[in-house]
Amino acid sequence: MNKIGIPRVILCDLDGVIWLSHKPIAGSVEAIARLHILGVQVLFVTNNSATPTPEVEELLDDIGINAAGCVLTSAQAVARLIRPSERVLVCGGAGLIGQISAIADVVVGHHEAEPTGIFDAVVVGFHREFSYEVLRRAAQAINSGARFIASNDDATYPTPDGPIPGGGAIVAAISAACGQSAEVAGKPNSAMADLVWSRCGDVKPDQMLMVGDRQSTDGKFARLLGCRFALVLSGVTAKSNNSDADFIGDTLSDIVKQLETQ
């Protein structure tokens, strides 16, 4: 930390911290602008794998945040677990399908015609087209020997109208159907940590802060990285009971104010 206690790098969650369903949370855009003025590098680290990274950057730009090259997603983390020669069944959104398509030789989306042959991996993420047929295809491929990989296991996803089922709920259904647990790539797991360190290799853990709305995901991820954690109450967590966060605030703006006055 420098003399005013501002980290060199802030890892900032998106859903529940910057926005809800891409609608900015009060003060979040201004808070990011303030961090940039203070010389802080902000990386947006999200477990949302459904939206392609360039589209996430464009959506952030639309609300006044320049995030070009600064968005790290769980889809990118999943890609670190896939080998170029693998045949992959993807049960997820466009972001996950696109990311894996850039790595693997053959990628079959859950929306395509009935796949044939043996898959090396089944990759699962949040998508709104989940159905019994998606469940059946995924379970059969896993039971036939495919590795079971999940972008994240967050059970819920924050929206302006409250939480809705998240990617973790889909992963849990497939896990129940095949009797196996998934290897999870996103926060708070090592594939996402490796992705962060690939961008922040010269930054020490005590020069970094993770800001998120979920203790079980963002808080644990901060501990894995060895950095401090700031919990905001603008997403899935409405109360700070039993939190061991280093900072707690209603919004990202509150966290930035605390950093400047500590």
Image: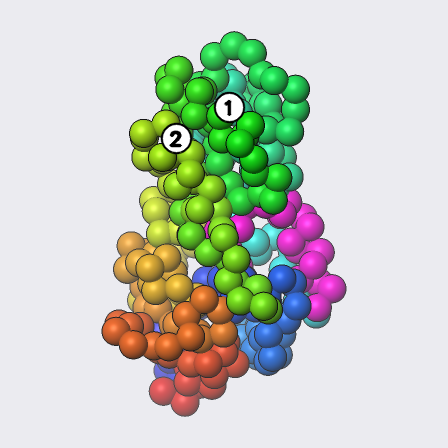
Q: Nearer the viewer, residue 119 or 165?
A: 165
Please state which amino acid type lies under the numbered disc 2.
Answer: Ala
List the single residue furthest toward the bottom.
Answer: 261
Q: Indicate yes or no whether the magenta region holds residue 259.
A: no
Q: Nearer the viewer, residue 89 or 132?
A: 132
In the image, 60: left or right of 149? right
Span highlighted in magenta in the image: 43-63
The residue that appears at 71% across and 63% down in the rendered structure is: 61
Residue 64, relative to residue 140: is it above or below? below
Q: Secondary structure at mark 2?
A: helix
Q: Quadrant of residue 81?
A: top left
x and y, in percent, of residue 142 in the image: 40, 23
x and y, in percent, of residue 165 in the image: 50, 53
Q: Quadrant of residue 37?
A: bottom right
How many neighbours does mark 1 have within 10 angstroms: few (below 14), some (14-19), or many (20 or more)? some
Q: Is residue 203 visible?
A: yes
Mark drawn on residue 177: 2
Count every numbered label the image shows and give the total: 2
The residue that appears at 34% across and 47% down in the rendered structure is: 189
Q: Indicate yes or no whether the magenta region holds residue 55.
A: yes
In the rendered image, which quarter contains the C terminus? Answer: bottom left
Please state which amino acid type lies under the numbered disc 1.
Answer: Arg
Mark drawn on residue 137: 1
The residue that appears at 61% across and 52% down in the rendered structure is: 69
How many neighbours does mark 2 have within 10 angstroms: few (below 14), some (14-19), or many (20 or more)? some
Residue 229, relative to residue 141: is it above or below? below
Residue 229, relative to residue 157: is it above or below? below
